[in-house]
Amino acid sequence: MVRQLSLHEAVNDGLKLEMERDPTVFIMGEDIALYGGAFFATHGLLEKFGPERVRDTPISEAAFTGIAFGAAITGLRPVVDLMFADFIGLAMDQILNQIAQTRYIFGGQVKVPLTIRASIGAGVSAAAHHSQCLYSMFAHTPGLKVVVPSTPYDAKGLLISAIRDDNPVIFLEHKSLGVSETYRLPTAGRQPVPEEAYTIPLGVADIKREGKDVTVVAVSLMVHKALEAAEKLVQEGISLEVIDPRTLVPLDKEAILKSVRKTRRLIIMDEDRERCGFASEVAALVADEAFFELEAPIKRIATPNIPIPFSPILESTIIPSTQSLIRTVREVVGK
Amino acid sequence: MSSFSLPEEKLIGLYEKMVLIRVYEEKIGEIFAAGKLPGFVHLYIGEEAIAVGVCANLKKSDYISSTHRAHGHCIAKDCDMKKMTAELYGKATGCCKGKGGSMHLAELEVGVLGASAVVGASVPWAVGAALSARIRNTDQVAVAFFGDGAINQGVVQECFNIAAVWKLPVIFVVENNLYATSLPTRPTKIQSQYSCSIEDLSKRALGYDIPGLTVDGMDVLAVYKAAEEAVQRAREKLGPTLIECKTYRYRGHFEGDPLMYRSKEELERWLVKDPILNFKKKLMEAGVLTEKEAEDISSKAKKIVEEAVQFAEESPDPLPKDAFKDIFVEDFY
């Protein structure tokens, strides 16, 4: 019987295995030691590895991300917990100007084996400063790999790859996937996750559902909304192919293009903001490479460029929904 | 045996290094004025005693982080001056292959973690290297060099706190050259606006319960002694120290700075305290150095600098395709 783990439990498992395997791996962030992390992803690690390698930091994001960089270029493999991606603002200089760019600036002298974990996403009325995705901004920055897992199985394999990677990796965990037992999306719950360490290479997309009529490129939690829509659309005789890129940098362009060449229709479902966002990037890619193979305009379903509101009714109004995808699918297939 | 507590060889070493930095920076100023360097440069002239006095206490395996005014730190920590100069020229042979330039010098081989052009940004790197030394269980220490401008950055204050809480082997060296670009640390006759509410920046250490001391940054022996104690404390795992070195940059913030924010009289007052001339005088009075030996030291420095400049000028430019390399470890961007 294989264990069933949630996304954050799978992350915990990956962290534990890598810390056991490699003494240079250590973790730090706010409330990660005794408390076990805001989403309990670091639960039990202090007990197992001690305070030297499981370090609670003061609330000083700029300093501890910069400190992680200093540790990474001097022989360690830090995993930093930024708690919420929204807190990036406090660490922006270190991430944008230093961590991301310094290998290049120094002519390749340094390797930066640094993983920054953070939670993303709306859906729990956490309001404007605990709900954003922001991965498009990271993907826009040169020098960062960006990983956005949608399932517990993927999260563990991708996290182990991220920790072993010699580049800075931003690893973003959707908070609604962590509390999946209370979430109503049918595919987003616990999932069998093997005990042993395994890796999923960064830059390889996964076809979460095969189909023939419309390609839906969906990120993180949106994968599950796309799968829900795909199930509902079966009754209408419409078949969706759901592609999960899993990593935005590097991006598996071939997997997306291959799918679009088969279905001839593309919708990108992206919880980050629409303007200059990841959905736009994929749309531009397909317009450049496969325009004449398309039978319908490319559609983006993303969050409008407004702050995430608190009230559940306001929040659910702006976050891409299964229903909005279904409507858009009907539009592109002409039904 | 002289009246100094340091062996003569060490004293001469301090003098040589300061002269080397001075000669180098004067040469770079000259080359820059001749239009041979891209970008801009920030010279360390006047502040030599700090880098030299601190780095003389470090081993090759110890770390330093630096700033936009990096040349002096790099020379003091024994960077390859040919590669460093080639970097200032943006050449392929530069320490950063021409991708960083004067404000981003780095040479990990000799423990120079690198310089950042964002004020204060490299301070956490030194703290991180100190944490790394702790976790790897080595006796390495790290020095963060930064200025009076950087001490007002949040990230620097955060670093003081974390280093204090974790008792990390790091030495914070604030080079108070009295001006954050144009803003004085304290009011002057010319400027009523200023950056710091205290005279001695070492007082900031009080808030973190770490030792803080202010020394004459124009006196290499005073700097040496303060750093010696701080390095020893760090190696004994007793935690960080904040050392403020009062100093003055003779030149502008950058070469070409119109300098309308400070007076000529002020500069003249500091020129009298020149770290090299005064140390030379002391060494000669003590019979440690003769005029002839001092001349030889200057000639030797000039030769090293000439060779570095020649190497840089004769070096090839990077290839255009090199712009696309070194972003990730793998070959993509």
Image (cartoon, rainbow, N blue to C red):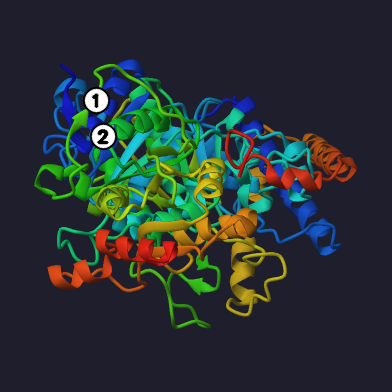
- The location of residue A291, given as percent across then percent down, is 62, 59
The answer to whether residue B215 is visible is no
Q: Is residue B185 above or below residue B17?
A: below
Q: Secondary structure at mark 2?
A: helix
Which residue is painted at 40% across and 67% down in the image? Answer: A331
Q: Using the image as rendered, state which of residue B46 and residue A221 is in the foreground.
A: A221
Image point 84% across, 62% down: which residue? Answer: B35
Residue depicted at 34% across the width and 19% down the height: A23
Q: Secondary structure at mark 1?
A: loop
Residue at image mark 1: A193
Q: Quadrant of residue A163?
A: top left
The residue lying toward the viewer, choosing from B134 and A139, is A139
Q: Amino acid at mark 2?
A: Pro
Q: CA distance from mark 2 to mark 1?
A: 7 Å
Residue shown at the point (31%, 42%) measured from the top left: A150
- The quadrant in which the N terminus of chain A is found is top left
Q: Where does the image place residue A206, in percent across and percent down from the top left?
A: 41, 37
Q: Is residue A102 left or right of residue A65?
A: right
* Residue density around tag 1, few if under 14, some if 14–19, many if 20 or more, within 10 Å: many
Placement of the C terminus of chain A among the 4 image quadrants: bottom left
Chain on which label 1 sits: A
Which picture quadrant has residue B192?
bottom left
Q: Farthest residue in the left direction?
A: A182
Residue sitting nearer the eye, B156 or A163: A163
Mark 1 residue type:
Val
Query: Are labels 2 and 1 assigned to the same chain?
Result: yes
The residue identified by callout 2 is A152
Whether tag 2 and tag 1 are in contact, CB under 8 A, the answer is yes
Foreground of the two, B225 or A184: A184
